Amino acid sequence: MYEIINSVNTALNNFIWGVPAMVCILGVGLYLTVGSGFIQVRKFGYAMKQTIGKVFSKKASADGSITPFQAVCTALAATVGTGNIAGVAGAIAIGGPGAVFWMWISALLGMATKFAEVTLAVEYRERNQDGEYVGGPMYYIKNGLGSKWMWLAYLYAGFGAITVLGTGNATQVNTITASINSALLNYHIISESGVKLSNIIIGVLICILVAIILLGGIKRLGQVTERLVPFMAVIYILLGVGLIVLNIGKVPAVFASIFHGAFNPAAVTGGVVGYFFLSMKKGVSRGIFSNEAGLGTGSIAHACADTDKPIEQGMFGIFEVFMDTIVICTMTALVILLSGVTVPYGEAAGAELTIAGFTAVYGNWVSIFTAVAMCCFAFSTILGWGLYGSRCMEFLFGHKVIKPYIAVYSLVAIVGATLDLGLIWGISDTSNGFMAIPNLIALFLLAPKLFALMKKHFNEK
């Protein structure tokens, strides 16, 4: 059965992430970039002012909403996760160091894409029966494109409700178990024979915590993420910067391998990764898995923000992609490539490769700190994607299905703790592609409305 599922998924993945998908993802990003006048470059300073400048704002949010900072923390909770740790490691192993270059390219265009998603989500959101703001791709399709495009909204919500189970939950739990087990094994607290039991215990604990937080509603989720996200980011960045400083002399050679490997991967990987499209494919797909630009999911969290200025909230989209991919994903790549660990080119790799990079430089003691950081990353992602899945289900079937769906979503953590990493990542890659298609079509069709909103906002400024 495993072989059949893997074969079917491989065929679908090759189709969905083939040349047409690359053209659509990069093409829509390029269209939005040019049409917006390169807003991610031209207004980068303004974006940082509107985002970092509001980090310390303690203004309370209105009923049924969360503060703009809580919204970005909830969105970052979902984006800064295994894509930054295990996803980057997998991209380098399968696509070579050059995959990092294509991550950067997808991030540059993705800033404009995510800006568009967040702006449109705030512009076309609604209130649900509890008085909470609800929005995202299904709502800007419904309210922006009209009834003739409702099939596209249902398609997105349907893919979303299923995708979050793997992308937002199972893969994250897999990273948590790998991180904790690495630390426990390094300190001989458990043996190899005890890993299976450890996985089950971790899965049950995550299941309980996720259910408690998500069932508390958007307010509780915002309160948790605004504390968890800054904490986890600081730990990881400090460890990463320290490793880079200790290996500063190798940095030029590593960057040379990234640029050279982007167009000639065989020259860097010894021929194991032999063609450039594979490097590009893995870099773009894992970049999107990490920053979610093109998926539209982050906009679901931003639609909950207590703001009446869609463009200003849209600036958080630029900030998120920059922090997620340009800063944190690049740091992970440097940790792996500078540490001197052996990269298993052509084979599946995950969080254990990143952990090995840290321990090779710092020693086994650092496995505790990397385990904590990675667990925070992955757990925060589970919370953010739980919100996304419940909003998709609410759009499809109404408010009454939210609690049962959250219960099922929480239980997936137990299953995810024991599944095969390669199959989970493969299915997540595929489902992300299916989710992106309806959203990219909507962004292309709603682009004129976005450009009009931008013109109005900056003219008023």
Image (cartoon, helix red, strand yellow):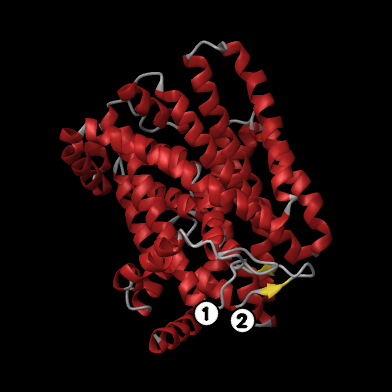
Q: CA distance from mark 2 to mark 1?
A: 7 Å
Q: Viewer-proximal residue, 403 or 277?
A: 403
Locate residue 168 relative to residue 257 in the image: left or right: right
Asked if the residue at tag 1 contacts the one at tag 2, i.e. Cβ–Cβ closer than 8 Å, the answer is yes
Q: Which residue is mark 2?
A: 145
The residue type indicated by label 2 comes to: Leu
- Residue beneath disc 1: 446
Q: Residue at x 34, y 29 (%)?
A: 343
Three-letter amino acid code at disc 1?
Leu
Judged from the image, the secondary structure of the residue bearing numbered disc 2 is: helix
Percent position of residue 278, x then y: 37, 46
Which residue occupies the extreme right position in the image?
400
Instruction: Determine which quarter of the picture holds residue 208.
Output: top right
Q: Is residue 276 at least partly visible in the picture?
A: yes
Question: Mark 1: few, some, or many residues within 10 Å (few <14, many ≥20)?
Answer: some
Q: Residue at x 57, y 46 (%)?
A: 381
- Give the side of residue 431 with respect to residue 255, left or right: right
